[in-house]
Amino acid sequence: MGQAQMVIQVIVQGVAMGSVYALMALGYVMIFKAVGVFNFAQGDIMMSGAFMGLVLYSIGKVPLPLMFILTLVFTALLGAVIETVAFHPLLESPSRSYLICTIAVGIILREVAKMIFGADPLLFPNYFGGHVLHAGPVAFSGDSLWIIVTGTLAVTLLLWFFSRTRLGKAMRAVAEDREVARLMGINVDANMRLTYAISSMLGGLAGILVAPAFYAFSEMGRSFGLKAFSSFVFGGTESVPGAVVGGLTIGVIESLAGVYISTQYKDVVSFVILISVLLWRPSGLFGEGREKRAG
């Protein structure tokens, strides 16, 4: 294999991983725009989605399209319930209380998963049986293409929802200023709940996309959540395009570092670059430097 073909393959793999990070980072952006606090439970909601997909697809033998739909519905309901029970009562509390609550919710989700499924990684069936696709001399896995296409469709649909629909515009208004939105007659509480539902659905989608490659395990939310959080900060904490660019950048850098430096140090390389960017531009690539509640 030539060097150019190898670089292209590595970049395709990086874009696939970056798409997963971008989906999760979009969830971080939605919550940060809505309440001004980092949601550290996002990674564990992603883990919950992976296990739900495993139960439906591997144990329940549910067809793939139906498994995707049911998992997204489950994670959306999970997010709405968590917002109602745990986060909403703290909406006007100091940001540190809200932040600690997101960490606690993540720990609870993780421990519940550990009690039900154990601590060992569980094999998640490969959607395409490891089938390899060829584009000229370049070969890449069907799973990589599946992740890229699905991630692109999800982001496109989300952007359309926020820019073209009445409900999406109402959610944007609530994210900008809850009190003004309330005076405009918008049901702020319902919109907050919907924001968490969609954010959690993005996490669930990321979980079932990546699980066939990395198994399903109770700690997976930590590692993927941290990478997605880095993507979110890298791109700018309130920027939707920033979340996408940040996720893809971290994914490609990580993939290239794993091949050309060492798989042991690929995480270190991506975080070194993240810190370098933040030293140069603390608000992230697409950030405007506007401060909200401390997270």
Image: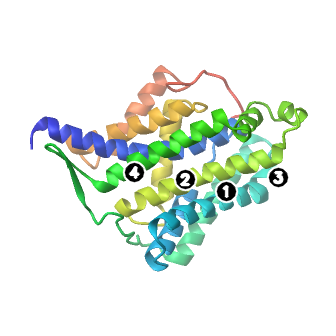
Circle 1 sits on which residue? 79
Q: Nearer the viewer, residue 35 or 22?
A: 22
Look at label 2 and name its amino acid: Gly
Distance Cα–Cα, label 1 vs label 3: 15 Å
Placement of the N terminus among the 4 image quadrants: top left
Q: Which mark is residue 127?
A: none
Query: Are the residues flagged by discs 1 and 3 in contact, CB closer than 8 Å?
Result: no
Sequence-earlier tag: 3 or 4: 3
Left or right: 119 as drawn, with respect to 32 = left
Distance Cα–Cα, label 3 vs label 4: 36 Å
Look at label 4 and name its amino acid: Ile
Say what secondary structure mark 1 lies in: helix
Q: Is residue 43 visible?
A: no
Residue 188, image x, y percentages: 82, 43
Residue 32, image x, y percentages: 66, 38
Distance Cα–Cα, label 2 vs label 4: 14 Å
Q: Which mark is residue 89?
A: 3
Circle 2 sits on which residue? 203
Indicate whether 86 appears above or below 215. above
Look at label 1 and name its amino acid: Gly
Q: Nearer the viewer, mark 1 or mark 4?
A: 4
Indicate whether 33 appears above or below 139. above
Sequence-earlier tag: 1 or 3: 1
Q: Nearer the viewer, mark 3 or mark 4?
A: 4
User: Could you classify mark 3 by the number of other residues whose Cα lies within 10 Å: few (under 14), some (14-19), or many (20 or more)?
Assistant: few
Q: Nearer the viewer, mark 2 or mark 4?
A: 4
Sequence-earlier tag: 1 or 2: 1
Say what secondary structure mark 3 lies in: helix
Distance Cα–Cα, label 2 vs label 3: 23 Å
Circle 4 sits on which residue? 147
